[in-house]
Image (cartoon, grey):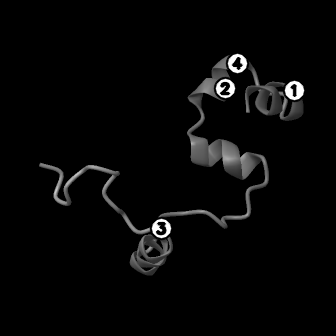
Amino acid sequence: MLRAGLQGLHLRPAEFWALSPAELALMLGATGQGGALSRAGLAALAKRWPDTPAKGEKNGGD
């Protein structure tokens, strides 16, 4: 990211470090595909990779 900012965008170091991650992503051409995980997205992840106790561990964490 630093190389992209300094060499690709020709920013000065102080300008680079003053940017937020969102500002840098926008300057690098991010398309906005990311963002916060929705409730439906979290449910899909939980279904795909359910939490299971480790071997020998009781459910509940105590």
Residue displayed at 83% across by 34% down? 9
Report the Cα–Cα distance between label 4 and label 1. 10 Å
Tag 3, which secondary structure? loop
> What is the residue that sits farthest to the left in this orientation?
62
| Residue type, mark 3 in image | Trp
Q: Which residue carries the number 2 mark?
A: 15
The percent position of residue 2, horizontal first and vertical second, equals 74, 26
Pair 1/2: label in front: 1
Residue displayed at 44% across by 81% down? 40
| Residue type, mark 2 in image | Glu
Q: Is residue 43 above or below residue 29?
A: below
Camera-nearest residue between 54 and 20: 54
Q: Place residue 1 in its image quadrant.
A: top right
Pair 1/3: label in front: 3
Mark linked to residue 7? 1
Q: Residues within 10 Å of mark 4 (few under 14, many from 20)?
A: few
Mark 4–mark 2 CB contact (< 8 Å): yes
Q: Which residue carries the number 4 mark?
A: 13
Residue displayed at 81% across by 33% down? 4
Q: Is residue 59 above or below residue 11?
A: below
Mark linked to residue 49? 3
